[in-house]
Amino acid sequence: MRGRGEGSMVEHDFDEWYRLYHRDVFAFVGYQVRSRQDVEDIAQEVFVRVLVGADRFQGLAAPKTWILAIARRAVADWYRKKRFKNLFSLNEVQDVASDELSLYERAEISAKEEALREALLKLKKDDRDVVVLRMIHEFSTEETASIFGWTSAKTRTKLHRALKKLQEMLGDDPLFDQMARKAAEEGVSLR
């Protein structure tokens, strides 16, 4: 990242980061918060923080890792602000389904995704975040550890425990089975 004195280069980097990572931020926040409006508000706040803090980016982590760490803190801040209000609204973040899928297939996929989302929301925040980053966004153990400020060993242990909790909630759900297979491929066993 270039210094603020170079003006348009900061804007250029910001525009590039937004283009590359805005979907990741929206997806990450969407797994934490149900209301589409809140997701949009939090994502906007994330990129405001990125722009304001761009001169502090030191390149010790990948820009995506740094931006999702900001997103994690922004979600935590949002929950703190909403602590005494109703945390869950009736609105949900929904991805637009492909036109090639039948209505039944879209409903089935949506129901499975909602079951996973509900189970994730029942986890503690750190557990939910480690699952979302590792299994959904496919961050490496090291990248995830960097976001949390943990060791790689602690990250693997937290992932294992969080997946065990999800397994208890979801049983033999196909989406969970897919995550469990991916975790096993990376050496995180659920036995």
Image (tube, rainbow, N blue to C red):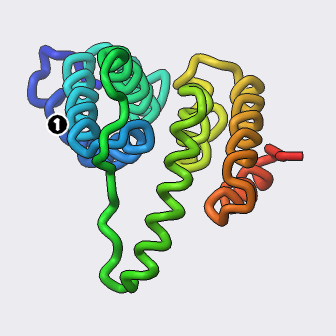
Q: Please state the horizontal and vertical placement of residue 97, each as a whole percent of the image.
A: 34, 71
Above or below, 35 against 103 in this view is above
Give the SS element for disc 1.
helix
Residue at mark 1 = 12
Q: Residue at x 37, y 24 (%)?
A: 70
Q: Quadrant of the N terminus?
A: top left
Q: What's the residue type where badge 1 is placed?
A: His
- The answer to whether residue 176 is left or right of residue 66 is right
Which residue is at the front of the view, 11 or 82?
A: 82
- The answer to whether residue 13 is left or right of residue 177 is left
- The answer to whether residue 55 is left or right of residue 108 is left
Q: Please state the horizontal and vertical placement of residue 46, each as a whole percent of the image.
A: 28, 28
Which residue is at the front of the view, 14 or 108?
A: 108
**Total numbered labels:** 1
Above or below, 181 against 118 in this view is below
- The answer to whether residue 90 is left or right of residue 161 is left
Q: Residue at x 62, y 31 (%)?
A: 127
When asked about the image quadrant of residue 129, the answer is top right
When asked about the image quadrant of residue 81, the answer is top left
* Crowd class of label 1 (few under 14; some 14 to 19; many from 20; radius 10 Å): few
Q: Residue at x 46, y 32 (%)?
A: 65
Considering every residue shown, the one lying at the far left of the view is 8
Above or below, 47 against 168 in this view is above
Which residue is at the front of the view, 141 or 96?
A: 96
Q: Please state the horizontal and vertical placement of residue 124, each as a whole percent of the image.
A: 59, 27
Considering every residue shown, the one lying at the far right of the view is 191
Which residue is at the front of the view, 85 or 147?
A: 85
Q: Residue at x 70, y 20 (%)?
A: 151
Q: Please state the horizontal and vertical placement of residue 100, each as a whole percent of the image.
A: 36, 85
